[in-house]
Amino acid sequence: MKDIRIAIIGHGFMGHEHETMLLKQPGFKLVGFSDVDPEQLEDVAEGLKRYASNEELIADPDVDVVLIAANNIYHHDLVCQAARAGKDIICEKPIAMSLEEIDDMVKVTEECGVKFTIHHQRRFDPDFRTMKNVYDSGTLGDVYSIKSSLYGHNGNMHDWHVHIDQGGGMLLDWGVHLIDQVLWMMEGHKVVSLYADIRNVINFEVDDYFKILMKFDNNVLAEIELGTYYLTDKNDEHWFERHWMISGNKGSAYEDGFWPQGKIVRTTSLLKNAGDKRTMTAAGPTRSFGPPAEGKLAVEELPMAGTTHDMFFENYRKAYWGEEEFLVKIPECRRVFALMDAVRESGRTGKSIAFEE
Ligand SMILES: NC(=O)c1ccc[n+]([C@@H]2O[C@H](COP(=O)([O-])OP(=O)(O)OC[C@H]3O[C@@H](n4cnc5c(N)ncnc54)[C@H](O)[C@@H]3O)[C@@H](O)[C@H]2O)c1
């Protein structure tokens, strides 16, 4: 197979990340960058092109795939321009700014017959994939609760991320990742209803906190909570806290950190206390919150996924050459957006919203 020749629009934070990754990714040839701010191109790696404009990049016959890593509000127009020039496209998340934009992008990319996917590389986050392994294995029995949370401690949102007309806010930033992960984990199941709260805790224009409760048709209640301003004196090794918890009737799994640590805790014998029997604990016969008696719990290691973000491009390469499907499909990204609209409505009205009944 020949290398997939790829050029990137936007050499900011994510453009640099892609540059580092694609320069060493087998099966790809990074061709160059464009950016509206010429200063952003000054440190483009040697040997790569620095295009004078997005139009020049899109028109380059040496480019097969355009990767769009510019601010959110330009995704729609840039995707459509690249499609009309016959280029295949990877666009950064969030796919766009609205359902109308997404529908238009689908129409244009389909008409032009180009490949189109979104960079949801957090489907390969090892913490998420480990918990997906746990869920998929069925080892926890009937799962009733899933919690995914992310807390930042310094309150720092920056640049265009604090402006609503620039596509800022945490729902569009991290929200799309966290929702996409849970929807993918629950693949095949509808979100019957949801309740959400979204707040501007310290930012004037954009959301910096949200909590979303989603009830699935398999009776799982999933909770996503994100806050950028959770002050703490823990001062641990990270500037954030990432946690997962999944609970079922045969066990629970907890996990902390993006490079996760955690355990599965299971039991079958505690179930014998269910119903109207007395709960025996190490402290004697007591009610619900005593410690379990010795030997009642089996503690197991998490089935660590060991996934890495370059696997997104590995999947892209194989799908590009028809060896497998693109992992991230546009209707899935549209569903995340439809769900975010319902989240905003719930946040606005303070009421739960029927979603996919
Ligand atoms: N997948 C992820 O984990 C992840 C992480 C961070 C950001 N992102 C996404 O990447 C995109 C860029 O975010 P960022 O954090 O790199 O922002 P950034 O501000 O650091 O970089 C954006 C760059 O695009 C340039 N730019 C803006 N408008 C442009 C246009 N019309 N044409 C060409 N260049 C333009 C800017 O000058 C800047 O250099 C956003 O859509 C963001 O949501 C994704």
Image (cartoon, rainbow, N blue to C red):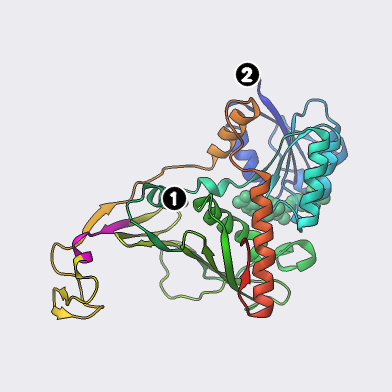
Is 276 located above or below residue 116 in the figure? Answer: below
The magenta span reads: 263-271
Point out which mark residue 132 bears.
1
Residue at the extreme top of the image, as rendered:
1
Side of 163 relative to 126 (left or right): right
- Residue on which the image places disc 2: 1
Side of 351 relative to 281 (left or right): right
What amino acid does circle 2 point to? Met
Residue 217 on the magenta segment: no
- For label 2, the crowd category at 10 Å Cα-Cα, with few meaning under 14, some 14 to 19 and many 20 or more, is few
Q: In the rendered view of the protein, which quadrant contains the N terminus?
A: top right
Secondary element type, mark 2: loop
Side of 296 relative to 44 (left or right): left
**138, 356: nearer the viewer:** 356
Q: Is residue 241 visible?
A: no
Q: Position of residue 156 (x, y in %)?
A: 61, 68
Is 80 located above or below residue 87 in the figure? Answer: below
- For label 1, the crowd category at 10 Å Cα-Cα, with few meaning under 14, some 14 to 19 and many 20 or more, is many
